[in-house]
Image (cartoon, rainbow, N blue to C red):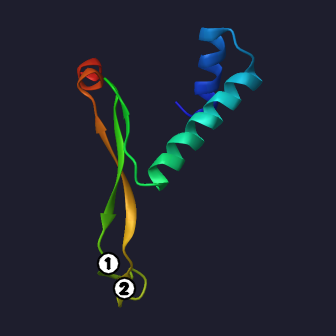
Amino acid sequence: MNKQDLIVRIVKDTGATKTQASRIVAVFLATVTKALKKGEAVTFVGFGTFKTSLRKAHTGRNPLTGGTIRIPKRKAVRFSAGKALKKAVN
């Protein structure tokens, strides 16, 4: 499922217009992104939790040249599935 499939499903299930559903999805994604950018965890009970973690700077290899390169520290997004989601999938 991609973003457009989600929008179509929201229109079908709620009776909202495609424009309204598209706006809702856009605002939802922007809100989650903004919270993660601030370092806040985003939790949906039963579904899961999105949070960020800090990856340390390290050295890596350039696959093209074989030389070593310095990879800077950065934030990574992590997702932990909730109990209800795990149960629904299995």
Horizontal side of 78 relative to 64 (left or right) equals left
The disc placed on residue 57 is 1
On the image, the x and y values in percent for residue 49 come to 33, 38
Earlier along the polypeptide chain: callout 2 or callout 1? 1
Horizontal side of 68 relative to 11 (left or right) equals left
On the image, the x and y values in percent for residue 52 come to 36, 54
**What residue lies at 62% left-to-right and 10% top-to-bottom?**
14
Which quarter of the rendering shows the C terminus? top left
On the image, the x and y values in percent for residue 59 come to 30, 83
**What residue lies at 29% left-to-right and 73% top-to-bottom?**
56
Q: Which residue position is annotated with label 2?
A: 70
Image position of 13 with respect to 85: above or below: above
Horizontal side of 65 relative to 19 (left or right) equals left
Q: Which-is-in-front pick, marks 2 and 1?
A: 1
Could you say whether the residue bearing mark 1 is in a helix, strand or loop? loop
Query: Are dots 2 and 1 in contact, CB under 8 Å?
Result: yes
**What residue lies at 48% left-to-right and 55% top-to-bottom?**
37
Quadrant of res 6? top right
Label 2, residues with CA under 10 Å away: few <14, some 14-19, many ≥20: few
